[in-house]
Amino acid sequence: MRARYLPASTLSGLLGEWADGTGPAYRILAERLRLLIADGRIMPGSRLPSERELTEALGVSRTTVASAYRELRDSGYLTSRRGSGSVTALPSKVEPELGRHHAPGIDTDGLYDFTCAAPAAVAGISTAVASAALELPLHLATPGYHPQGLPVLRSEIAAAYNERELPTTADQIIVTAGALAATSIAVRAITQIGDRVLTESPTHPNSVDAIRRSGCRVVAVPMSPGGWDLPLLEATIRQTAPRAAWMVVDFQNPTGFLMSAADRQRLARAFARSRTTAIVDETLFELSLDGQEMPPPFASYDPDGVITVGSVSKSFWGGLRIGWMRVPEALVARILDARASMDLGAPVLEQLVVADLLRRRSTLLPERRASLTERRDALAAAVSAELPSWKFRMPSGGLSLWCELPEPVGSSLVGVSQRNGALLVAGSRFSPDGGLESFIRLPFTLEPEALRDGVERLAASYASLTTGAPTRRAGVMIA
């Protein structure tokens, strides 16, 4: 696959006021480029402009650009390929000590766990289980296999889409064992080995793994500090012609951004022009924390070209393991065929439980949102007080803060924090192509007191990694 070209005008915009610094201009330029590559703003494998093009765009001497490129080559952030020019790279693959949730052999008991962005069960689960148990005998005389899902649950899910003014029938709903299973099935159904699948960076790592294990090539588009870079997305779609795209547009995991209605319409049109099937994950849709009006579903702008993935894992409880797809009518049979080689349907009892929860979501979810708002505010206050050099944008929904550190020490912080009683996942785990070493995702799913204590542990760990940082003594007890 050819390296993706980064135009000089785009690179100039990413560099910003790069010349504000002391020392030789080429070293300042090289350091700025290095940080952009390390943090994933410039993806590894991108082809940079020629020395002449960048010289003209920045208004500097050819020597400045040539020397900066040479510095990057010497440090392993740039390689020269015949026919490809100067291509960005990472000097080595840094693997965090805890790359997944959870790494085998890691005992999380007694540790502050910041690795899992999923809350405990919402109040009302036990009542729903009791209600479902009364309905279960009606299904015991059947084999129990429902590849498309129980009609009662599919009707509830379809009704929720209709309430959001996205016309949907129960026949368009396919119930799965969670959102990740839905993503895997959808990718398998609409792609072939070697096809390109576009996604954001950073993004949910397990979903990226599922795409790659389907034999597809991931095309990652870096997000900007303000959210989705629509011009870059459109350019990448034109250049790579992806067969599919996997996106999270509602409180994006891990950044927390919410895509506007105008941007949804614009991006949907770009996908339609390229005949790219969009798989849009709405797992976090219900977790609006500031009372804002939510944009229309992404599929509203292309009902026949978008597969919508949903789940109750974040809104109600991950232990139910129930997700679904809203599928264009023309694709239902194709997706059911792909699903047959993976499983024969989700558990009947859990589907009955979820159907009951969805009927009562208007009374159950306000308490969930209130609890998460309190925890978000507690975590934000703790990080601001204990780690004032960390930058984050307060998300209006979702489950986590996306924190930017002054230094690219994310993977090192994971190991140190574990020894100090806090579990983390490095920001690099959320990058499909590496980088993002200056970022850490912090979920706000623990109790407020635990969040504050956990941040104190993080502050002590971070201080031990940075020169001149104030030393903070961690408490003796771990609870």
Image (tube, rainbow, N blue to C red):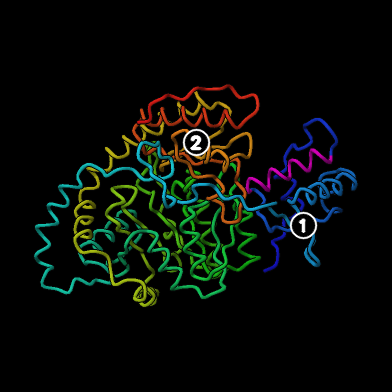
Q: Quick one: quadrant of the N terminus?
A: bottom right
- Disc 1 marks a residue whose amino acid type is Thr
Classify 155 as above or below 404. Answer: below
- Disc 1 target residue: 79
Across and down, in percent, residue 184 comes to 42, 66
- Highlighted magenta segment, given as a residue range: 26-40
Q: Quick one: quadrant of the C terminus?
A: top left
- Disc 2 marks a residue whose amino acid type is Ser
Query: Relative to residue 136, is residue 147 drawn left or right?
Result: right
- Disc 2 target residue: 417
Identity of the residue drawn at 13% across and 68% down:
139
**Considering depth in this image, is 398 or 341 the residue closer to the camera?**
341
Q: Residues within 10 Å of mark 2 (few under 14, many from 20)?
A: many
Secondary structure of residue under mark 2: helix
Q: Main secondary structure of the magenta part?
A: helix
Classify 244 as above or below 455. Answer: below
Classify 176 as above or below 130. Answer: below
C-alpha distance separating marks 1 and 2: 34 Å
